[in-house]
Image: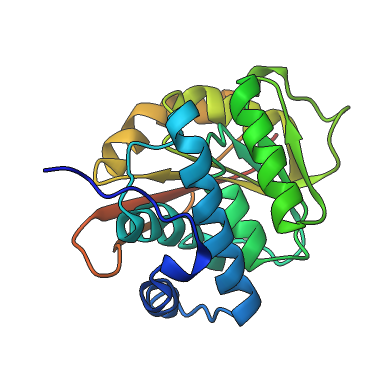
Amino acid sequence: MVSRKLPNDNGAMNEQLLTAGAQSFDLELSAHQVAAFGQYLSLLSTWNSRLNLTAIREPDLVVRLHFLDSISVTPLLSANGGLLDIGSGGGFPGIPVKIMLPDKPVYLVEPRRKRANFLRHVIRELKLGDIQVMECRAGELSTETLPPIKETVTRGFSDAPGFLAASGEVLAADGVAILMHGPKGLAALEDVRSCLPRCGLAEGESVHFELPFGDERRTVLTFPRSLSR
C-alpha cells in the first residue's frame, strides 16, 4: 500500500480528530491552537522527506500517534514551571505541550544538528515564546545552564536510565521526571527501579490509557525527586 504524504496546507488537517481527541483528555483547543497544530503538521511534511523526522506520514496518524500522544501528558504538568524535553527529535512532546501551555517555559534537548535546526524553524514559524533548543546530549545538562526545572519528560527515548540520571541532575527540589512509554511501560519500570536511588528519584504514579480512536496502549511513569536526597 502506498502511504499518503502529509498535507502541505493547514486546511487538510483533520481538525475534528484533533479537537475530539483532546477532549478525551479533558483538554479544550482554541482556534489559535488548532491552527498552530495545522502549521506544525505542514512543517513536518516539508522537512520529513529530508530528515526522516518520523516514519508516520499519514496525517490522521500523525495527529493521533504524535500530537494526541504528546498532549496526553499535559494534565500531569504544572501550568508555568520549566519543562525539559530530553531527546526531543521532531519536537515530541515538547512543542505540542508548548502549544497547549503557552506560558510554560520549555527546553528541547536534541543533539543532532539538523533536527535541532528543524525545531528552531518550527519555533520561529509558530511564533512560540519562552522555548529554547539545547543542542546537546542529556549527559551534558547541568543546573549551571538551566533555570529551575519543574518537570523533565521523554517520549520514546531509548536510554531510560540515562534520562533519569540527567533528570536527577537538573530537577528542582519539587520536580518530577516523566517517562512516556508504550504498552511495555511496567517492564520499563522494573528495569529502572534499581537506578532510582542514585538518581535522587522515587517511584511515583503510573498512568495507563489508550489513545483516542484506536487501541494503542500507553503508560506514563512519574518519578518525583526523592526527599532523602
Image quarter (top left, top right, bottom left or bottom right) of the N terminus = top left
Q: Specify the farthest residue to the left.
A: 1
Viewer-proximal residue among 133 and 10:
10
Q: Residue at (31%, 55%) from the top-left corner?
A: 61
Judged left or right of residue 229, residue 130 is right
Judged left or right of residue 224, residue 45 is left
Viewer-proximal residue among 61 and 214:
61
Percent from the top left, x then y, of residue 4? 27, 50
Name the quadrant containing residue 202: top right
Q: Residue at (59%, 70%) from the top-left corner?
A: 35
Q: Is residue 62 above or below residue 173?
A: below
Question: Residue 101, can we see it?
Answer: yes
Q: In this view, does 170 lie above or below 13?
A: above
Image quarter (top left, top right, bottom left or bottom right) of the C terminus = top right
Viewer-proximal residue among 86 and 175:
86
Q: Residue at (24%, 54%) from the top-left corner?
A: 217
Percent from the top left, x then y, of residue 144? 88, 27
